[in-house]
Structure formats: structure tokens, C-alpha cells
Image (cartoon, rainbow, N blue to C red):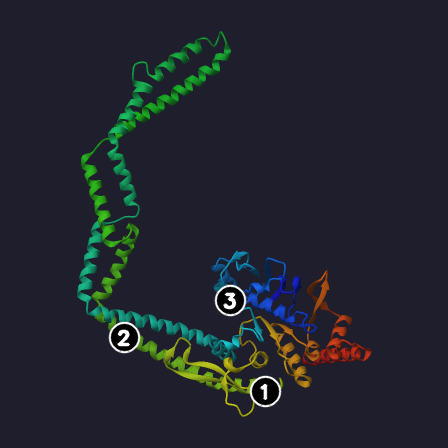
Amino acid sequence: MLTDLHIRHFAIIDRLHVSFSGGFNVLTGETGAGKSIIVDAVALILGGRANPDLVRTGEDEAVVEAVFDLSGRPLLRRELDDGGFGNEDELLVKRVVNRTGRNKIFINGSLAKLSQLQPLTTRLMNIYGQHEHQSLQRVEYHLAMLDRFAGLTDEVETYGKLYEQVREQDARLRALEEAEQQRSDRLDQLKFQQHELAAADLKEGEEEELLTERRLILNSERLVRVAERGYETFYAAEGAISEQLDSLAGELEKLCDVDPFLTGPAEEIRNALYVIEDVAFKLREYAGRVAFDPGRQSEVEKRLDLISGLKRKYGMSVGDMIAHAAAIEGQVEDLTHADALREGLKHKLAAEREALLVKAEAISTCRHEAAEQLRGAVEAQLADLAMQRATFEMRLFPLDEPGPLGMERGEFYLAPNAGEAPKPLAWIASGGELSRIMLALRRAAPGGDEISTLIFDEVDAGVGGVAASAIGSKLRDIASQAQVLCVTHLPQVAACADHHYRIQKQEKDGRTFTELVSLQGELRVEEMARMLGGAQVTERTLEHAREIIGQSMSGQQERT
């Protein structure tokens, strides 16, 4: 659900912030007040084109931010987390349109790409009107809507998993059959590699250890020489440092009775003596341990040459070769028993294909039945929305063989007027018609999609009277399942809203500003009266406005 919308320096909007609630929200205002600009700003959140002309005159950039409540969308939150955008109850989407064209997108504060934004926000919100963000204009969504209407979503998902399983098994079988002609050569090659790598007995980290050992061997003479010289200097030589320190410490200790101050220096020299003696003994031990061993050097060099040769031959690191050796075992097993494996796969694949076909036929039967039910339900709804002569249908086109979604593809067809042949909905429907068709689908098939915020723009274009009241009533019913935002100029529609906002334009210091005002009580009555009577608001139009609001509230109470 869309909870907050922040707009800054966008067209004639300087700064605007509005908090939306659930239920049915309407936005009204005089022509030219900026209603379409609000919708254009929301379209940016849906991945619309960031045109520099949208930036307000005198400003460098325009900013649109939208906050969504994701508390009921655990799957979407998990996908956001996997994408590095966090896993929070709220989603913040921000678009920055720069006059120079350096535009930016942020998702929960992190930079994002348009390809990441669009699949995300179009699952949360949709605009129905003269805009490009129309799920009805995306044919790939039509079949999913029918499946949700028919309650087939889980069945189609199970079918899809079986379809992928069949594809994997089929690919494995084809690989075995293609490899059959070269099986003998390939098997010999794999067995050779298996034997070669097994004989090499490679180990993780071994190469690094050998390189370290070789470095020690090559420098052994120098290491011993320096260690022995240290031992001699510190301890073994005549007049060694330890001997001098011992003598000096002894003389100072004898003088401590004369001057107690010398006790400290004497102890420190004695401690230094102990440290030097310890270092001397360690160097002596090290010199005795390090020795040049031509035999070991030869072994290390041979081993490193072997590893280096294998790395060049296989084009892999030691770790990758170890993994490759493990994979070879499975390949050798498959090729050795290829005949039996292939026959087993054939039988298994035949059984799975049969199961897939049975499931696809069952889904297809349900789809054809549901398509007819959906046609009747949608046409009944359209009759209430000033499209009495419209013909709506879901056409199912069979595929040559089962696909990932079943045995057919589907597309909505529409004939808006009597006597016309139905044509693909995405080709012919106007913005207002698309809005009303989506409204009809939402009423005919509650939960037909997962979108939680629906924005209707021009849904009431070209209608009035009873049809307008029907549109308002249906929007209110839909708002019990999803948040609805509707830009309208009809008081019959506005009267059904749970929350009413007026978009108004004003001038200040020679500049035009647009603001959004929440209307309650008499303010709402006054706006309804303006919608009924134009600029001249009279007591009669005020009373008429109260009557329409009262009738709408009474109708709502009757439904509940």
C-alpha cells in the first residue's frame, strides 16, 4: 500500500507531501490544477521516462519519493533482501530527475537500476488511464488473471515445476544420446584424466606450502649463517654481549649498598641478559634445524613442476582441478552405464511427459470453463459502467506442445460497441475504457492480481448520472480489497470515497504552486458543491452535495 508521496520541484509543484490511507481515496480539483501532474509523478515511481522537462523552472532537479507498506508481502520483502535492498516493513523508492540528464534511482536508500525498479513497483501499484503502466496492455498477464479467477494459481505453479523437471530430464537424455557417438573416446579421455588427477593426489593449499618450503631451501645457507652469527655475537664468542652484560650487572649489584639507585638499572640489565641468552639459544636451535637437503629440494621442485604442468594443461587452479576430479567420477559412471541410464531416463521421461500432459489438459479444461464465466461476469459489470454494448472475452490459443504455463496462451479481446468484431484489448482500448475494464475485472474477479494499490485516472471519462454512481460504488467495493486512488471530476464518484483530497493551484510572487488538501466536513461539502455547480456555489448546491454524500454513506452501510 502507498502510504506517503513526496514531490519536489516537479512541473508546477514546488513541494508536496501527502499521506494516503487504505480504502478509497479520491483526488479532485479544477481543470489545470495539476491532477495529471500527480499521476505523472507516480508514473515515475513505476519506471516511467524521466524527462528533464519535468523539472520545475529555475530548479536543477526534481525528486519524487514514495513509501509503501510491505507488512503483508513477505515474499517481496525476501526478494528485496536478496537484491541487497534490505528486509523492512517499509519500502522507500526515490527518483531524481536532473536537468542535465544525470538521473538517479534509489531503493531503500541504495542506488538501483531501472530494470530493478520496474518489476518491483509494478507489483505494488498500477495506473489505469492514459499511461503506459497497464497490466491489461501486457498480454503475458492476461492468462495469470484468468488463472487467479479460476483458482488455478497453485495448480499452474505445480505444473510449471513439473515442466521444468521434464525439460531438465529431456536435456540430460539428449546429452547422453549426443555423447553416444563419441562415448568411447570421451570415456577414454575422462578415465585418463581421472587416473592422472588421482595419481597427482592434489591437496588444497599444497602449492603455497611447497613454494614456501622451496624459498627456505634456496636460502638455507644464508639463513644458517646469519643465525649462527647471531648466536656467536650474543652468547658463544669471547667477549659476547651476554658476557659483557653479566659482568656489568655484577658490578652494579655490588655497588647497590653504596647507592640503592643502582638496584633498578642492575635488574634491568640482568633481565636484558636473560632475553639475549634466550634469543641466542633459539638462533642456535634454528641453525641446527635448517640444513640444505639437495634430495628434498629435488622433490619439491618436481612436485611444483607437476602442479604447474597440470594447471597449464587443464587451465584450472588446484582447487578447480580437485573439483573437476570429483565431477569426472559422475561422468565416467554415466558413460560407463549409458545404455541402462538412457533407457531408464526414457521410461522416466515418458511417464513425466504423460503426467505433464494430464495436468495440462486438466488446467486447460478449467481455463475454458473459467473464461466463459469471466466473460459473463465482466460484461455484467461493464453494463453498469456505461459500456452496455461492449463484448469482452478471454481467448485461449492452443500451443503445438505444452509450454511453461500449459497448453495454451491467453489474451483478452474487446468489442467496445455493438456490431464490431472483438479485437485484442491491448490494441484498441482507450485509457478510460481500460480503467473501466480493470474496474470490471476487479469486481468480477476479486484478487485477480497481487497489486495492492490501484490508481484510476479518467475511469469516469464520458459517463455521468447512474453510470457515474455505479463507478463510485464499484471503486468503493474494490477498496475493501486494495487501496484505491482515483482522479475524478464527477461528484457521484467522489461521494463514495473514504478520503477526499483537493488539488488546487495558487500563485505566489509570480510563481504557480500546486498543493494537495485533505477535505473533511464542510470543506468536503464545499468541494462537492463546486463539482456540482461550478464556480458559483449556492446554498442549493451545498445541500445537494450533502445529499449525495449522505446517500453514498447510506448505500455503504446497507452493503455492510
Q: Residue at x 34, y 80 (%)?
A: 354
Q: Residue at x 33, y 70 (%)?
A: 168
The local crowd at label 2, few if under 14, some if 14 to 19, many if 20 or more residues have their Cα within 10 Å, is some
| Residue type, numbered disc 1 | Ala
Q: Is residue 57 visible?
A: yes
Is residue 264 or residue 494 the one in the foreground?
494
Residue 279 is situated, as x and y percent measured from the top left of the image, at 35, 24
Q: Could you tell me which secondary element the residue under label 2 belongs to?
A: helix
Residue 250 is situated, as x and y percent measured from the top left of the image, at 40, 11
Is residue 501 or residue 284 the one in the foreground?
501
| Residue type, numbered disc 2 | Lys
Which numbered marker is on residue 346? 2
Along the horizontal axis of the image, is 206 left or right of 511? left
Task: Tell me the distance, in whole angstroms, between the alpha carbons under discs 3 and 1.
Answer: 33 Å
Q: Could you tell me which secondary element the residue under label 1 belongs to?
A: helix
The residue beneath circle 1 is 380
Q: Quadrant of residue 247?
A: top left
Q: For the N terminus, which image quadrant?
A: bottom right
Nearer the camera: disc 2 or disc 3: 3
Which numbered marker is on residue 118? 3
Discs 3, 1 touching: Cβ within 8 Å = no
| Residue type, numbered disc 3 | Gln
The local crowd at label 1, few if under 14, some if 14 to 19, many if 20 or more residues have their Cα within 10 Å, is some
Query: For the view shown, which residue lies furthest in the bottom direction?
Result: 419
Tell me which label, 2 or 1, sits earlier in the chain.
2
